[in-house]
Image: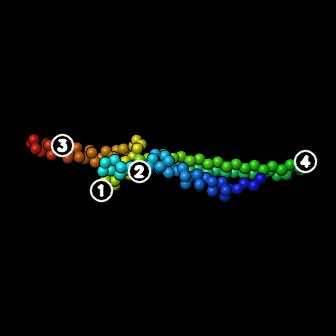
Amino acid sequence: MDLHFDELLGKITDFLKTEAKTETVVGEPFELGQFKCVPVIKVGIGFGSGGGESIENKAKAMKGQGAGAGAGIGIEPIGFLVTKGEEISFIATGKIHGLAAAFEKVPDIIEKIIEKKAKDEMTA
């Protein structure tokens, strides 16, 4: 049994070139007013293979071979790169959890503290 891993890998690579694109998953870049938006994806790929050959059994004079291969791909939209003039931002599409969510809220919290302090100073 001949396994042609080079051919298999070539076919998988060709598939990835055509399918693992933002255009295929979430669409083309677009403009929304003054904003230019470019979709961003995350691609994960896994490969596995194995094979074996049995030792000749002298009593039955048999040989055996076996092989297998598998692959998996995951493509997920994760956000958009957004530009306005010379400013570039990333807007995530998923929910943010844990410590990352806390850090995301820090600028808003600081702004509210500064506003409250300024308001307190004006009334004092």
Mark 4, residue position:
59
Q: Secondary structure at mark 4?
A: loop
Mark 3, residue position:
116
Q: What whole-number distance in Å separates the C-alpha atoms at marks 2 and 3? A: 41 Å
N-term mark: 4 or 2: 2
Where residue 115 sits: x, y (%)?
18, 45
Judge depth for marks 4 and 1 and give the one in front.
1
Mark 1, residue position:
85
Q: What whole-number distance in Å separates the C-alpha atoms at marks 4 and 3? A: 90 Å
Mark 2: few, some, or many residues within 10 Å (few <14, many ≥20)? some
Q: Secondary structure at mark 2?
A: loop
Q: Secondary structure at mark 1?
A: loop
Mark 1: amino acid: Gly
Horizontally, is 19 left or right of 57 in the view? left
Residue occupying the point 89% across, 49% down:
61
- CB within 8 Å, label 4 to label 2: no
Mark 3: few, some, or many residues within 10 Å (few <14, many ≥20)? few
- Residue most extreme to the right: 59
Horizontally, is 72 left or right of 27 in the view? right
- CB within 8 Å, label 1 to label 2: no
Residue occupying the point 66% across, 54% down:
8
Mark 1: few, some, or many residues within 10 Å (few <14, many ≥20)? few
N-term mark: 2 or 3: 2
Mark 2, residue position:
29
Mark 2: amino acid: Pro
Front-most of residues 112 and 83:
83
